[in-house]
Image (cartoon, rainbow, N blue to C red):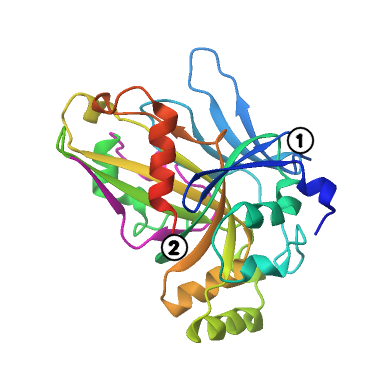
């Protein structure tokens, strides 16, 4: 762990039980969210790693669906830690200011900005590759909602695997009879072929004995309102939580084999997130966004 000087850079406040906010005044930008300005079009959003764009992760359009597209292989090592986090992070404990301060070695790799930290559990399905018709992106409701004819031609995914939630989280909006389904996507930065089988089996044994080791994510949340919903054509709405695995690829594989919900500790980027409101929800976008994240915190 870094010195107390580094830890003091974190401006931490509590938003709700299990949901913490961090204002980061400085960072190395090893992990960075890039935004490409396009005249007359939606701005594209990218995940940059060590100065190179690795994934396109959607845009800031208020009616556009979520996607991620691998531009260049991240080439991170599953055996080499990108940050030396204290072992106390893995102890069963609440997400509070003390824990967040101990994440300072990871925050040091981020760019300046606002983040929210919370823990959640996801029962995983997959992994799916970019042309797997069992994945969400080939779901009939998804294609109808966003008026997509052929996911392959749309190029929604490209050459990288991901995991999904087995079932979406449901949020009901009785004021307009809309049912919102949240789909969780987990995106590794290390391919399965690079994992060591003995490490996966070790974590699988720990999980079988009741341990729930944390997987660390860089997350974002995207919720747009498609034209089909605005026009009242559909009463279903899809929102998306997505997380890139910063630490815990072997744990991720072990949880999937064990068939129990995986425990994720998320550092969520405000810059990479978008959360548009239904007209009945008012205009306080940030409050509604924080309420949604608080509902995910366990």
Q: Which of the image's four quarters has the C terminus? A: bottom left
Q: Is residue 132 visible?
A: yes
Q: CB atoms at circles 1 and 2 under 8 Å apart?
A: no
Is residue 225 found inside the magenta-colored segment of the image? no
**Residue 87, image x and y in percent?**
71, 69
Q: Badge 2: how crowded within 10 Å, few (<14), some, or many (20+)? A: some
Which residue bears the numbered disc 2? Answer: 121
Tell me which residue sits at (76%, 41%) in the image: 9
Viewer-nearest residue: 76 or 292: 292
Q: Which mark is residue 26?
A: 1
Which residue shows up at 31% across the image and 30% down it?
A: 225
Instruction: Report helix, strand or loop for mark 2.
Output: strand
Q: Tell me where residue 238 appears, x and y as whole percent.
A: 31, 42
SS assignment at label 1: loop
Rounded to the nearest whole Å, what is the CA distance between mark 1 and mark 2? 30 Å
Q: Earlier in the sequence, mark 1 or mark 2?
A: 1
Quadrant of the rendered image containing residue 66: top left
Residue at image location 77% in from the left, 48% down from the top? 7
Q: Position of residue 54 (x, y in %)?
A: 65, 44
Q: Report the magenta residues as a range.
A: 147-173
Q: State left or right for residue 24 relative to residue 69.
A: right
Q: Which residue sits at x=58%, y=54%?
A: 96
Of the pair 21 and 236, the residue shown nearer to us: 21
Whether residue 155 is visible to the viewer of this picture, yes or no, is no
Establish if 160 lies above or below 292: below
**Quick one: which residue is furthest to the top in this view?**
40
List x then y, in percent, for residue 79: 74, 69
């Amino acid at each position: 762990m870094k010195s107390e000087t580094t830890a003091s850079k974190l401006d931490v406040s509590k938003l709700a039980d299990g949901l913490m906010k961090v204002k980061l005044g400085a960072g190395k930008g090893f992990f960075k969210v890039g935004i490409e300005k396009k005249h007359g079009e939606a701005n594209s959003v990218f995940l940059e790693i060590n100065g190179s764009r690795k994934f396109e992760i959607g845009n800031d359009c208020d009616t556009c669906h979520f996607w991620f597209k691998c531009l260049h292989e991240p080439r991170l090592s599953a055996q080499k830690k990108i940050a030396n986090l204290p072992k106390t992070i893995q102890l069963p404990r609440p997400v509070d200011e003390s824990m967040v301060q101990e994440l300072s070695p990871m925050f040091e790799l981020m760019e300046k900005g606002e983040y929210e930290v919370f823990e959640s559990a996801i029962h995983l399905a997959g992994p799916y590759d970019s042309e797997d018709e069992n994945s969400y992106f080939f779901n009939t409701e998804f294609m109808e909602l966003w008026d997509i004819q052929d996911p392959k031609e749309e190029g929604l995914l490209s050459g990288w695997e991901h995991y999904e939630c087995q079932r979406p989280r449901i949020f009901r909006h009785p004021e307009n009879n809309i049912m919102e389904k949240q789909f969780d996507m987990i995106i590794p930065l290390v391919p399965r072929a690079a994992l060591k089988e003995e490490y996966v089996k070790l974590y699988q044994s720990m999980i079988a004995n009741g341990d729930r080791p944390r997987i660390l994510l860089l997350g974002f949340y995207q919720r747009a309102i498609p034209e089909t919903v605005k026009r009242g054509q559909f009463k279903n709405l899809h929102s998306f939580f997505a997380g890139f695995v910063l630490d815990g690829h072997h744990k991720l594989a072990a949880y999937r084999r064990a068939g129990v919900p995986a425990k994720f500790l998320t550092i969520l980027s405000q810059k990479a997130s978008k959360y548009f409101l239904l007209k009945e929800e008012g205009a306080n976008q940030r409050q509604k966004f924080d309420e949604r994240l608080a509902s995910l915190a366990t």
